[in-house]
Image (tube, rainbow, N blue to C red):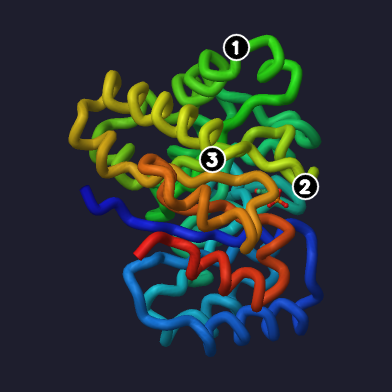
Amino acid sequence: MNRTRIVAGNWKMNKSYEEGRDLAKAIAENLQPSETVVVLAPPFIHLRGVAAIAEGVSNLHVAAQNCHQETSGAYTGEISAPMVRSTGAEYVILGHSERRQYFGEDGPLLAKKVKAALAAGLKPIFCCGEPLEIREAGTHVALVVEQLEASVFDLSPEDFAKVVIAYEPVWAIGTGRTASPEQAQDMHKEIRDAIAKKYGRDLAQQTSILYGGSCKASNAPELFSQPDVDGGLIGGASLDAKEFMAIIGSFPA
Ligand code: PEP
């Protein structure tokens, strides 16, 4: 089964507008045409500028890092899914552990955001993953399946087919501590099995499941060679064009 391979760079709250354009240009200029889908997720203010840079590059796409659940209204400082889509962005990251932890985003709210994104024509990159204490207690699979059930498992099969899943163990995000290839593979398989139980084998086999958590050029080849790992959601290492390009080139031949 040839699933879409995706490498997405989550810039988080980094880069001035000029620095962001420079980074996007460096990637756009060096990206070889291939079947790997590359997604840049800059801060909101960069979206239009980065989308313009990505326009002429067939496998380069743009994502927001969040969106509001309502389409418009009196929500000072917020950005809606249709506004994101109007910039040319095609994806939106939802459910990142930093949004869950620092902004109190929970399963029901994320379910609304996922639906708002899909209604606006955006593809959600839905993040799930357990904190360290849950991993140590051995209940990580149950928690991740609960996160999926709470926010994406009530979608129609047609809508679920547009969702990309990113498994990001919280203990590996920005810590330099990566899940081992075996730990990543085990969880990705559990996620795919849960999708199969809900939506059937075919849809599960078509779903791209990305790994995130201190993924870099040195460990990406081993992670990306696992059968259920379809690419990565990259934080820190996506801020450097050379490192990010090397990660993009890390899939087995
Ligand atoms: C992330 O925040 O999605 C992430 C994976 O970060 P890092 O690669 O820096 O661990």
Residue nearest the viewer, comparing 205 with 86: 205
In whole angstroms, how far apart are the C-alphas of marks 2 and 3?
15 Å
Position in image of residue 251 (x %, y %):
43, 61
Camera-side residue of 125 and 3:
3
Dot 2 crowding, Cα within 10 Å, few <14, some 14–19, many 20+ = few
Name the residue beneath numbered marker 1: 139
Amino acid under label 2? Gly
Which residue occupies 62% across, 49% down? 66
Q: Depth check: give the residue in front, 117 or 55.
A: 55
Instruction: Indicate the position of residue 224 as horizontal and vertical percent values.
Output: 47, 52
Q: Which numbered disc covers residue 176?
A: 2
Which residue is pictured at 76% across the width and 53% down the height?
A: 77
From this view, report whether residue 50 is shown above or below residue 147.
below
Q: Disc 2 vs disc 3: which is toward the camera?
A: 3
Residue 227 occupies quadrant? top left
Dot 2 falls on a residue whose secondary structure is loop
Per the image, the residue denoted by label 3 is 181
User: Marks 2 and 1, Cα distance to the nearest angstrom?
Assistant: 23 Å
